Image (cartoon, helix red, strand yellow):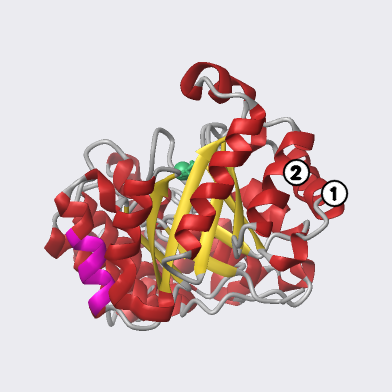
Amino acid sequence: MSDKVIIFDTTLRDGEQCPGASMNLREKMEVARQLERLNVDVIEAGFPVISDGDFDAVEKIATEIKGPKICGLARCVAKDIDAAGAAVKPAGERGRIHVFLATSAIHREFKLKKAEEEIIRLAVEGVTRARGLVKDVEFSPEDASRTEPEFLARVVQAVIEAGATTVNIPDTVGFAVPDQYASLIGYLRSNVRNIDDAIISVHCHDDLGLAVANSLAAVKAGARQVEGTFNGIGERAGNCALEEVVMAIKTRGDFYGGLHTDVVTREILKTSRIISRMSGLHVARSKAIVGENAFAHSSGIHQDGILKKRETYEIMDPEEVGWGGTELPLTKHSGSHAMKVRLEHLGFHLSDAQLKVVYDRFKDVGDKKKFVYDDDLAALVEDSMTSD
Ligand code: KIV
Ligand code: ZN
């Protein structure tokens, strides 16, 4: 099994399904160009049959973006598959059709009103039709994590026989928990005879806040493609945040035993910012990797530790993901060490006695404001020196 984890970005398809995140063609192209610079392996550019706008975006991305594979989504319906095939055609060998059909009992009974054998027949027909258009076909049994494992294994085996090159196991409603999801991947690896003929992919939603944990557990169990979005945007609580998966695999190489992605991690922050701007969805300050506070340390103990050795409180180098460096914002929690370093940076070299006076006043200011800014510091120093 390969050591590479394929990164499949669906920001422009599942991410765009986040209410209020629709993007126009110009915005989608800007995101796609950045995903190309980031070097993701697959861009799911849209769902071509749903609108002319989606078709045009997938086609333009397939025409202009070089490098990543370009994928279009389709239900197991001839007109969807044909539209996806036409939209990804300009990408040539890099074109992928992603066909999906729900398999869980609840979806079979209430949504599709179809029996198990009918589902298998439709899935096989869909994959066969897609293989007539492109060589690279992904199949997703929607709601896989709530599907009976024995039935799921039969579906997976049948679609691989029909020519699916990637089989995705979606946790469509974010129901899975890590151990169980990893066991499901393990079950499929042991019970699907031809499983090695396809890449196993995972696609997790974040309804229980477990999308990243589930994806990583699945990778450990043998999945080699992770689907998700940047900033974790997507339906409801969103999709698996790819920046977190990429950095977890990189940072915890000790645990993931040599696995790697080909993502250019220094482009991560820029990608997050572009997607936030294009989708209109803000990133929480405390969001891992890309939030404003992800590499900011405010407490005195932490700031002191960082100033002595960065790794005392940082597990990643912020520059690795595109930040300018570690940040030590000055607040009422800050210690005198961080204040002294900041003052020196501003050109103030004070004696220990002077520092003590300034630090006492610094604490008073910190009690009244969220941050003590450089201007506040300069005023404090001047004030302390003149009142001496
Ligand atoms: O969440 C889901 O099941 C999907 C499929 C179309 C893969 O987005
Ligand atoms: Zn999804």
Residue type pointed to by label 2: Ala
Q: CA distance from mark 2 to mark 1?
A: 7 Å
Observer-nearest of 259 and 338: 259
The location of residue 28, given as percent across then percent down, is 21, 62
Q: Is residue 75 left or right of residue 143?
A: left
> Could you tell me which secondary element the residue under label 2 belongs to?
helix
Badge 1: few (under 14), some or many (20 or more) residues near its Cα, within 10 Å?
Answer: some
Segment colored magenta: 56-63
Residue located 54% across and 40% down the image: 122
Dot placed on the residue nearer the N-terminal end, 2 or 1:
2
Whether residue 59 appears in magenta in the rendering, the answer is yes
Residue located 58% across and 48% down the image: 124
> Could you tell me which secondary element the residue under label 1 belongs to?
helix
Quadrant (top left, top right, bottom left, bottom right) of the N terminus: bottom right
Whether residue 104 appears in magenta in the rendering, the answer is no
The location of residue 222, given as percent across then percent down, is 76, 61
Checking the image for residue 112, the label placed there is none
Give the labeled residue for mark 1.
191
Residue located 67% across and 64% down the image: 198
Residue type pointed to by label 1: Asn
Residue 161 picture quarter = bottom right
Q: Is residue 228 left or right of residue 4?
A: left
Name the residue furthest top: 110
Q: Is residue 259 left or right of residue 138?
A: right
Checking the image for residue 153, the label placed there is 2
